[in-house]
């Protein structure tokens, strides 16, 4: 059997079975052994270093991730995704060290790559993320709009825009709108459903449906368990509130505030997905979000109904 076939098979085994074992709590040993075996076959294969670098990044081993992504880029100067991930990580590490020279250098490199690859979603998406981290929100928005124009069917780009606009304005309405656009692109986008479920919790309406919908689409046991816990918590609150405070509006609103304060400060952060946390940032911002008008409430509930109808369509 050709060595390229074996190498590719080992990378796939690490990425699929290795990541599944990792998410089920069995660590990264299996995946790393697969990559090590692949390197014994082809030590100069850029794909091995790229995928192992991504795994290290997911595990928080940032220096190992940087070294592998740098190696992958050195082996193939046209491996744009590896180059962008390397520069993105280099920028993040420079931010942590407050090294302005490296940060500015990375921005210059991204500008150069963007001029060379004007039709690359990967380049402009990473460039927008780096600009967002640098607080250059208008520039980031412009780069991300280029990406969305190139591929408006990618729900991750919609979520990235929602994250950017939320960070720039602290307006949760922007996040909601772009999560809904993500669901227009893919009605099974788990992160968008999770975030909209958290937003709907402020209405005491539909949030449980969103969390349950998330869990039905998720393939990971741990994530399913967490989403079901969120679903049960919101359901039990609604059940108790309706029984104890059915005709006492002031008491109901006070009770809602107490529940939301506990939920967003103590409970939700334990059970939210990492991706949702990354997009939202400080989830306690949701405490300040409320449905100010009947029109806004009706719109949100109408959108919720539409999302449910999407999910029920075959295929």
Image (cartoon, rainbow, N blue to C red):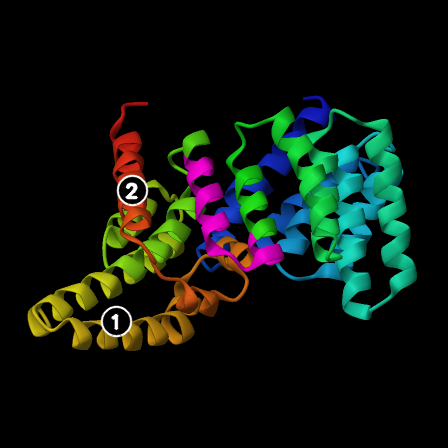
Query: Disc 1 vs disc 2: Cβ atoms closer than 8 Å?
Result: no
Quadrant of the frame with the N terminus: top right
Q: Is residue 54 magenta?
A: no
Q: Is 14 situated above or below 166? A: above
Q: Position of residue 83 (x, y in %)?
A: 80, 40
Mark number displayed over residue 304: 2
Residue at the location (45% across, 57% down)?
273
To which quarter of the image does residue 74 belong? Answer: top right
Q: Is residue 174 magenta?
A: yes
- Mark 1 lies on residue: 256
Q: For residue 254, say whether it is visible.
A: yes
Neighbour tally class for label 2: few under 14, some 14-19, many 20 plus, Cα within 10 Å: many
Q: Is 253 situated above or below 133? A: below
Q: Nearer the viewer, residue 312 or 72?
A: 312
Residue at the location (59% across, 43% down)?
14
247 sits to left or right of 173: left
Q: Nearer the viewer, residue 134 or 222?
A: 134
49 sits to left or right of 289: right
Q: For residue 49, say whether it is visible.
A: no
Q: Nearer the viewer, residue 173 or 192?
A: 173
To which quarter of the image does residue 113 belong? Answer: top right
By secondary structure, the bulk of the magenta-drawn segment is best described as helix
Going from N to C along the chain, the mark reached first, 1 or 2, is: 1
Q: Is 234 situated above or below 193? A: below
Residue at the location (63% across, 37% down)?
10
Q: Position of residue 195 (x, y in %)?
A: 41, 52
| Local SS, label 1 | helix
Q: CA distance from mark 1 to mark 2?
A: 21 Å
Residue at the location (39% across, 56% down)?
222
Magenta stretch: give its range. Answer: 166-183
């Amino acid at each position: 059997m050709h060595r390229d076939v074996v190498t590719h098979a080992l990378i796939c085994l690490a990425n699929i079975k290795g990541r599944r074992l990792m998410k089920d709590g069995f660590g990264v040993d299996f995946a790393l052994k697969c990559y090590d075996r692949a390197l014994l076959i082809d030590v100069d294969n850029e794909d091995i270093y790229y995928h192992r670098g991504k795994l290290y990044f997911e595990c928080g081993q940032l220096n190992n991730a940087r070294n592998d992504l740098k190696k992958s880029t050195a082996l193939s100067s046209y491996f744009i995704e590896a180059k962008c991930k390397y520069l993105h990580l280099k920028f993040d590490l420079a931010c942590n060290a407050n090294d302005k020279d490296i940060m500015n250098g990375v921005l210059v490199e991204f500008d150069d790559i963007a001029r060379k690859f004007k039709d690359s979603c990967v380049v402009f998406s990473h460039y927008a993320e780096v600009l967002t981290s640098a607080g250059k929100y208008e520039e980031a928005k412009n780069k991300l709009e280029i990406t969305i124009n190139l591929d408006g069917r990618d729900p991750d780009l919609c979520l990235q825009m929602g994250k950017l606009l939320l960070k720039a304005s602290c307006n949760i309405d922007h996040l909601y709108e772009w999560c809904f656009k993500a669901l227009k692109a893919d009605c099974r986008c788990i992160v968008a459903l999770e975030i909209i479920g958290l937003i709907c919790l402020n209405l005491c309406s539909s949030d449980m449906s969103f969390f349950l919908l998330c869990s039905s689409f998720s393939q990971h046991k741990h994530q399913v368990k967490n989403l079901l816990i969120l679903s049960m918590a919101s359901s039990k609150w609604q059940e108790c509130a309706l029984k104890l405070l059915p005709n006492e509006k002031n008491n109901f609103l006070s009770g809602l505030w107490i529940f939301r304060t506990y939920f967003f400060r103590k409970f939700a952060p334990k059970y939210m997905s990492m991706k949702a946390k990354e997009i939202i940032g400080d989830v306690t911002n949701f405490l300040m979000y409320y449905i100010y008008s009947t029109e806004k409430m009706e719109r949100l509930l109408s959108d919720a109904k539409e999302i449910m109808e999407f999910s029920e369509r075959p295929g």
